[in-house]
Image (tube, helix red, strand yellow):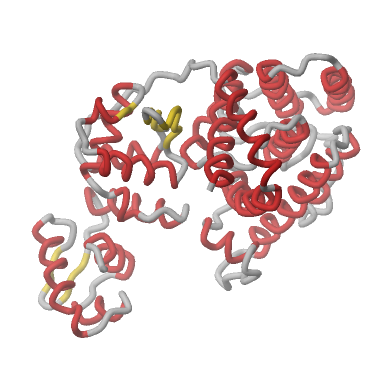
Amino acid sequence: MVTKYDVFEVVYKTGLLRPKEIVEKLGKTEKDYKNIYRILTELENEKLLFKKEEYFGAKKEGKSKALYEIILYCLSNNINYNLLLDKNLVNFVWNGLSNGEINQKSTNLNPRTFTKYVQTLNKYGLILINSKKPLKAKIFYNTLINNLLVYFGFKHLEVKKETTDYSEEIKKELSFYNKLRKKNELGFQKIVSEFEVSFIHHSLSLEGNPITLPDTIKILKDKITPANLKTEDVDELKNYQIAILQMLQDSQQRKPLSIESVLNYHKLALAHRQEIAGKIREVEVYIKGNPNFKVSKAEDVKAELEKLFEKYNEFITSKKGSTRDILEFASYFHNEFQHIHPFVDGNSRITRLITFYLLNSMDIPIIDIPFGLLEDYLEQTKGSKSRNDKALQQSLSRIILFNLKKINERLEG
């Protein structure tokens, strides 16, 4: 069924249209005309659209602009905007963020509505379900959530930084995961394949690749390349997929990481830029937009890489194998590699790839960064003003726990 947001999106995107043209653009027939005209009138009354003679249009400012930006953001990330543009759901989000944790008793919602809202947020990586019985969860805060709150008139929130130690909960989920995976290895591999495409989109979107998630799926899964995309952006997706598939294969075989293997991942991922692919930099670089992020001098890169991989080899051969030990080392390893910044370009995507390798090779499955945690992760990595391994450990812990719960939910069926 056509919603008012579907109608609004078509008008805002296209410009002045007659009702009949709107019906056609929505792929509807004459029998839907009356309902769509009713929606147009409703949007006009809400001042989201205006009418000029027999045409309807949208002002590219104020509330109309804010609404379209939310819709466009959702479309780019394969999110059904009709599910999120619900004032009652946004009120639910507001309460959850205000209280830190959300449960059915704190919301006064009936069980069916409560479950519906949690499932919607979980589907799009916007919530972490801490327990199912009783159901408790924490909502992630990001730009989309903020824009929804503002659009529906809720005050700006100062969300407290997460400080929960999730290592024991991760340990419990890992135990459950190991049992489920033994029973359904084929199902696990299918999940990895599905998550892989999402991770490629999420990872490269952090690097400024403009290709949307729907188009990423078309390119990597359906092998269809939309004509309006730049060749380099498409090659970037395809090459990163090749590098990730190699990483997953290597981690399953438990091959130790080395400088040589990292150079190979970079060579695969940056194959569209042969002049720098797989080569340690010999020039100075910096993080665009973040002068506070200090990276190694070109003359120190090789020595610092060798030192980092000495520590990596010491760790994987040591008896330190607790969940907390692995999380601490993974956070240190991620930050150290990113601050060394050994390549002219592609450092952050390779940092994520080899950190995922490290965790997967130590039987901690991590195959995506959920949409709701992308901004938090970025803030703790190349967006940080100063290095903080503990803050990154907190971010990685939530990412890992989200992955585990998603995988276990799917394997349990």
Where residue 2 sits in the image (x, y, percent)? 26, 68
Left or right: residue 383 compared with residue 100: right
Residue beneath the point at 65% across and 51% down: 187
Q: Residue 276, can we see it?
A: no
Where residue 87 sits in the image (x, y, percent)? 21, 44
**Residue 374, relative to residue 296: is it above or below?**
below
Q: Residue furthest front?
A: 183
Left or right: residue 289 compared with residue 139: right
Q: How many numbered marks appear?
A: 0
Residue beneath the point at 45% across and 28% down: 130
**Residue 319, relative to residue 297: is it above or below?**
above
Residue beneath the point at 87% across and 39% down: 261
Occupied quadrant, residue 283: top right
Q: Residue furthest bottom?
A: 30
Q: Residue 13, can we see it?
A: yes
Left or right: residue 160 compared with residue 325: left
Occupied quadrant, residue 207: top right
The quadrant of the rendering that contains the N terminus is bottom left
Occupied quadrant, residue 302: top right
Q: Nearer the viewer, residue 295 or 181?
A: 181
Where residue 31 sits in the image (x, y, percent)? 18, 83
Left or right: residue 214 compared with residue 318: left
Q: Nearer the viewer, residue 34 or 375?
A: 34
Where residue 55 sits in the image (x, y, percent)? 17, 75
